[in-house]
Image: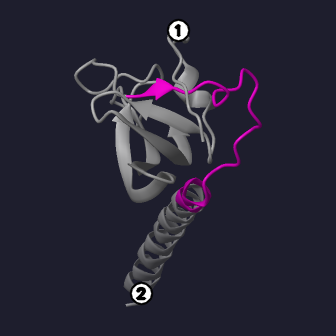
Amino acid sequence: MDLKSLTKWDETWVTRLRRGHWVYLPKENEYAQVVSAYEPPEPGTWCGRIMIQMTTSMYDGLHLKNIEQWFTQPNGRGLNGSQIIIPVEGNCPDDPPPLSEPWVRHVERELEELQRIIIRQQAQIDQLHLDLVRVVIQLA
């Protein structure tokens, strides 16, 4: 497999990577394959994350090895601002297919809704308890 890294790219190219795309890691002088697409930064942070599978060069081509989570900005720069990921020719489409939402985000929304329901029901139970206490006091 012949991989060639690009010399020019835009400021949001990492957001268009999908599973199976290749990137070049200049500090390691290695190529890596994207395992899961870029996730934007959490609120209050400025680096998102991407899962990549490192490679090693062998006499018969590239071999995949460990999977790592890398924190990066949408332009491929790391926490300290240095370029840690570079796009590979043919692996950074201008119009990638849409991403499906990670299931964990769906679960988080469901849990938040359940928490709101529990809080409302607890308030109703508390009010019923107060009403019961008032009735008992009036009957006494």
**Percent position of residue 64, x then y:** 46, 56
**Percent position of residue 112, x then y:** 52, 57
Question: Looking at the picture, does residue 123 appear above or below residue 53?
Answer: below
10 sits to left or right of 49: right
Colour pattern:
one colour
Locate the C terminus and report the quarter of the image it occupies: bottom left
Question: Looking at the picture, does residue 95 appear above or below residue 30?
Answer: above
Magenta-drawn stretch contains 90:
yes
* Observer-nearest of 25 and 138: 25
* Observer-nearest of 45 and 81: 81
* Observer-nearest of 72 and 32: 32
Q: Earlier in the sequence, mark 2 or mark 1?
A: 1
**Percent position of residue 1, x then y:** 60, 42
Question: Looking at the picture, does residue 139 appear above or below residue 2?
Answer: below
User: Tag 2, which secondary structure?
Assistant: helix
* Crowd rating for badge 2 (residues with CA inside 10 Å; few <14, some 14–19, many 20+): few
Is residue 40 in view from this perspective?
A: no
Contact, mark 2 vs mark 1 (Cβ under 8 Å): no
The residue drawn where x is 60% and y is 34% is: 17
How far separated are the C-alphas under marks 2 and 1?
Answer: 78 Å
Query: In this picture, which residue range is highlighted in magenta?
Result: 85-108
Q: Which residue is mark 1?
A: 8
The residue drawn where x is 40% and y is 80% is: 133
* Observer-nearest of 131 and 109: 109
Question: Looking at the picture, does residue 13 appear above or below residue 104?
Answer: above
Please tell me whether mark 2 or mark 1 is closer to you in this view: 1
**Percent position of residue 136, x then y:** 42, 87
Is residue 12 in view from this perspective?
A: yes
* Crowd rating for badge 1 (residues with CA inside 10 Å; few <14, some 14–19, many 20+): few
Q: Type of residue at label 2? A: Val
Q: Type of residue at label 1? A: Lys
Q: Which residue is mark 2?
A: 136
